[in-house]
Image (cartoon, rainbow, N blue to C red):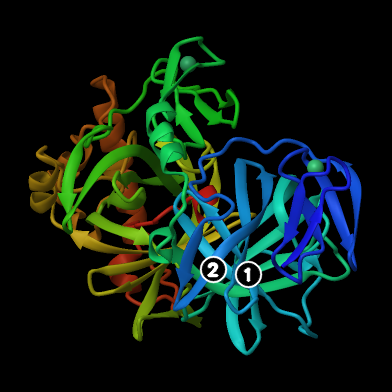
Amino acid sequence: MFRSQCPACGAPLNFQSAASTFAVCSYCSSTIVRKDEVLESLGKIAQLIDDASPVQLGAQGVYLTQAFQVIGRIQYHYDVGVWNEWHVMFASGRTAWLSELNGRSTMTFLQEGSQELPAYEQIKPGLQLTLQTQLYEVAYLAQARVVSGQGELPFAIGAGYEAPVVDLRGVGHPGFASLDYSDRAAPRLYLGLDVPLAALKMSGLRQERLKELKADSIRALQCPNCGAAVQVNRADTRSITCAACHSTLGVEVEGIALLKKYEKAEFTEPPIPLGQVGVLEGSTWTVVGFLQRYVEEEGTRYFWDEYLLLEETSGSYAWLTSDSEGWKFGKTLEAVPEVRGQTAIWNKEKYSLTEKGNALTDYVLGEFNWRIMQGERASYRTYKRGNTVLSMEKTASEISWSCLEEISPAGLSAAFKIKVPPVGGGSGFSGLSMPASGLGSAATVGDAISTPFKRKGSGWAIFYIILIIIFLIWVLSRNDCDPRVENCSSSSYSRGFSSGYSSGSGSHK
Ligand SMILES: [Zn+2]
Ligand SMILES: [Zn+2]
């Protein structure tokens, strides 16, 4: 340890790691650069934004079998909030970065050496890179900016410092990689693992802060569109819909912004309402968000529904989807399945490509841990094996995978203590998004449109019947199976997607 004094205020200033060349004085917030044994002040740094992190300087933990201590911090701001990179030192003297956001965390180690990395402009979600012999896929891109820092760091930082960062997930392995393009000419590569904060057995956390957060995470804000009161219930909420005008609102560190006004005259009540609680796979889930999405093909919109579920104790999220084939339940994957042609391999099992297209989010209701928007587009691919579905979704800045399994409407009704319809899938023209097996069966068509999504007004009934006739003619005349897609004959008419949409902010580290 190198012991000295802050050149600005004279307070004691210690460097625990020999690799630390930069520090922020905890007394006067001056940024101090260390050259050999001489300290020089570079001036004061901006204040940290008070965030939800339970980690703090001095906290200790165990990564795999190695004990570590938190010695520094860089706080970043990106499009939807702030996150921290905690500089940690192991007993051996080796240092690493603990990146932490909403209970999820990664531990990564700087890789020195001659790894060839692509230019930042070439990076896009889905790009695969071999890093130190293993394959990784770009999952997320963020344009981040340094807010402030704390403690000791291996390089100098300043507020406003631009840091484009890229997160990558291991393809078929649990590795996690991060690229920092702060210096475009010499990007830094970090490799490590995605580990839940709970697995790091940390001590010295801000317990009192956690309690505080529980108490003040409920924030009362005002809708910028209609002025109604909007209650934000969780610390990790990034977007919420106004219960009065149904506009989608973005929750900022301070305050709230209008993302999108709701333009339709009517709005949809989901079959399982927000706030409904159910027990699935031994965990208690609360419905916190609802999305209605569709894919358009030859002028017809095929709808399906997605529910965002929250397990309050662990803060983890899951998905419940409902489409013309029924209901599915599952979670976002933390590693990437391996894709070979029309096959995705996950846990050594092969899944076949059954659907692909562009999904549009048509309707948004509730509270989300990422910035969601009505009208948002994502390309998707669905792979199936028996009753299990792997779903990939890609936007301009993110790619995510989820795994969902069929769940019976009866089981779901029992779990949520509410009668759920046997199939879901949509408002408006939902009668058209039915399984192939149901074609020609008036009962099935009737059932499909008498879901709670049915729009009011009897004039619609005639319209539906005409549309159904047109649809049947179209189906009977259609014979253009894509030979590349397996099971085409049985699935091409049923837009049975189960797209596990994943969180943008939540998946970032
Ligand atoms: Zn000082
Ligand atoms: Zn409003």
Q: Residue at x 47, y 40 (%)?
A: 236
Residue under label 1: 96
Query: SS at mark 2?
Result: strand
User: Reading the chain from its start, which is encountered first: label 1 or label 2?
Assistant: 2
Q: Which numbered disc covers residue 72?
A: none
Ligand number 1: quarter of image:
top right
- In this picture, residue 505 sits left or right of residue 180: left
Identified at 33% across, 53% down, the residue is 318
Relative depth, front residue between 293 and 64: 64
Q: Which dot marks residue 68?
A: 2
Find residue 18 and report its horizontal and vertical position in percent. 76, 71
Mark 1 against mark 2, which lies toward the viewer?
2
Q: Residue at x 29, y 26 (%)?
A: 455
Q: Amino acid at mark 1?
A: Ala
Where's residue 420, x and y in %?
Answer: 15, 41
Q: How many marks?
A: 2
Contact? badges 1 and 2 (CB < 8 Å): yes
Alpha carbon separation for disc pair 1 and 2: 9 Å
**Closer to us: 502 or 73:** 73
Q: Is residue 255 visible?
A: yes
